[in-house]
């Protein structure tokens, strides 16, 4: 199978980030050029370590991991230990990573990679706050037309927010960065809560990972069992939403998802709605369409893909 996507994963792991990374590393169509860590679910010193733990779990210690922004552009860092546990990867007992963090800053790695590779061949896959991506666009504006696309998890519209009534966590943590990214002119595919809240980690779906009988399968089940308990209590559902793997799944099987091109604007002025992604779903403004916003998912197909690919690791 030939590589059809060359990607940089920008991430703040997070159990759902971890599953997204495992899906990418288990998929031969995807070449992971590097993983860049950002502060988000937990502080940077933990997210960069967690990224390395996951690469080692997947048996891919040669993967390049870089540390990036330690805090958002403007606002103080907000983290989510209540959801992810104090390590960010609570659930399985994963050893301290032996692989080294790469020298240099994540933002420099993003810029240098995009400037060195052929234009239109590298996709950015942000799974956390958009701080590193915005900093790269600020540092070297020439990268914008060179990016094939940005496929991101963030925002919400019909579902509202999960951190405030209006805002989803990734966008809320660094709304100013999100505003820069959505105004960048780069083609964007957005996986909001409207999609991810339809991809629930039910008991049956988690059992399928454990039944793989592999170290990676069991660790995935343990991560998801820890991760879902917060959302089950909050939403009263069987299972919690599995957000970040939707980004990688869309690259592999876009037919699992449906949505439409919209304008998305990010609120950065009002404290009441700070970080809200205002999606012009019905085309009632003259604002240009800047994102393909997904709204529906074939959840069974999505979990089947996850089990198949994670089963290969």
Image (tube, grey):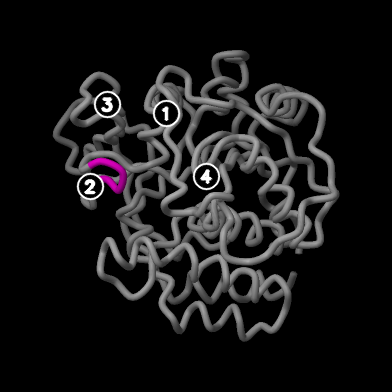
Residue 205 locus on image (x, y percent): 48, 79
Instruction: Measure the C-alpha gap from mark 1 to mark 3.
Output: 11 Å
| Crowd rating for badge 1 (residues with CA inside 10 Å; few <14, some 14–19, many 20+) | many
- Under tag 1, what secondary structure? loop
Q: Of callouts 1 and 2, which one flags the residue occurring earlier in the amino acid sequence?
A: 2
Residue 193 locus on image (x, y percent): 33, 52
Instruction: Name the residue rendered at 72%, 34% in the picture.
Output: 66
Q: Which of the image's four quarters has the N terminus?
A: bottom right
Q: Nearer the viewer, residue 243 or 228?
A: 228
| Crowd rating for badge 2 (residues with CA inside 10 Å; few <14, some 14–19, many 20+) | some
> Pointer 3 and pointer 2: residues touching (CB < 8 Å)?
no
Q: Which residue is mark 2?
A: 160
- Under tag 4, what secondary structure? loop
Instruction: Measure the C-alpha gap from mark 3 to mark 2.
Output: 13 Å
Q: Which residue is mark 3?
A: 267
Name the quadrant containing residue 286. top left
Residue 20 locus on image (x, y percent): 58, 56
Q: Of callouts 3 and 2, which one flags the residue occurring earlier in the amino acid sequence?
A: 2
Instruction: Measure the C-alpha gap from mark 4 to mark 3.
Output: 20 Å
Q: Of callouts 2 and 4, which one flags the residue occurring earlier in the amino acid sequence?
A: 4
Nearer mark to the viewer, of 1 and 3: 1
Instruction: Name the residue rendered at 84%, 47% in the picture.
Output: 99
Instruction: Measure the C-alpha gap from mark 2 to mark 4.
Output: 19 Å
Question: Does 260 sit above or below residue 67?
Answer: below
Q: Nearer the viewer, residue 57 or 82?
A: 82
Dot label at residue 127: 4
- Under tag 3, what secondary structure? loop
Q: Of callouts 4 and 3, which one flags the residue occurring earlier in the amino acid sequence?
A: 4
Dot label at residue 195: none
What's drawn in magenta, residue-wise?
160-164
Q: Which residue is mark 1?
A: 174
């Amino acid at each position: 199978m030939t590589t059809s996507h060359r990607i940089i994963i920008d991430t703040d792991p997070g159990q759902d980030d971890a599953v997204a990374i495992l899906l990418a590393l288990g998929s031969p169509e995807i070449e992971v050029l590097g993983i860049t860590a950002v502060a988000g679910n937990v502080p940077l010193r933990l997210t960069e370590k967690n990224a390395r733990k996951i690469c080692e779990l997947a048996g891919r210690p040669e993967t390049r991991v870089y540390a990036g922004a330690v805090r958002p552009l403007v606002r103080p860092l907000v983290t989510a230990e209540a959801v992810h546990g104090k390590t960010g990867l609570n659930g399985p007992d994963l050893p301290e990573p032996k692989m080294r963090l790469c020298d240099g800053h994540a933002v420099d790695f993003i810029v240098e990679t995009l400037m060195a590779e052929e234009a239109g061949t590298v996709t950015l896959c942000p799974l956390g706050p958009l701080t590193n991506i915005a900093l790269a666009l600020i540092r070297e504006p020439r990268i914008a037309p060179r990016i094939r696309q940005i496929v991101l998890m963030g925002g919400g519209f019909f579902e509202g927010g999960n951190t405030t009534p209006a805002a989803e966590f990734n966008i809320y943590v660094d709304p100013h960065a999100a505003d820069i990214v959505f105004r960048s002119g780069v083609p964007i595919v957005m996986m909001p809560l409207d999609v991810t809240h339809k991809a629930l980690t039910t008991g049956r779906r988690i059992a399928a990972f454990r039944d793989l009988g592999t170290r990676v399968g069991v660790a995935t089940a343990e991560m998801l069992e820890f991760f879902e308990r917060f959302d089950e209590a909050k939403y009263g559902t069987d299972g919690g939403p599995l957000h970040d793997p939707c980004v990688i799944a869309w690259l592999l099987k876009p037919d699992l998802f449906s949505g439409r091109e919209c304008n998305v604007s990010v609120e950065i002025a009002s404290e009441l709605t700070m970080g809200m992604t205002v999606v012009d779903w019905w085309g009632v403004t003259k604002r240009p369409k800047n994102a393909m916003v997904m709204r529906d998912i074939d959840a069974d197909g999505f979990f089947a893909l996850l089990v198949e690919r994670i089963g290969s690791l």
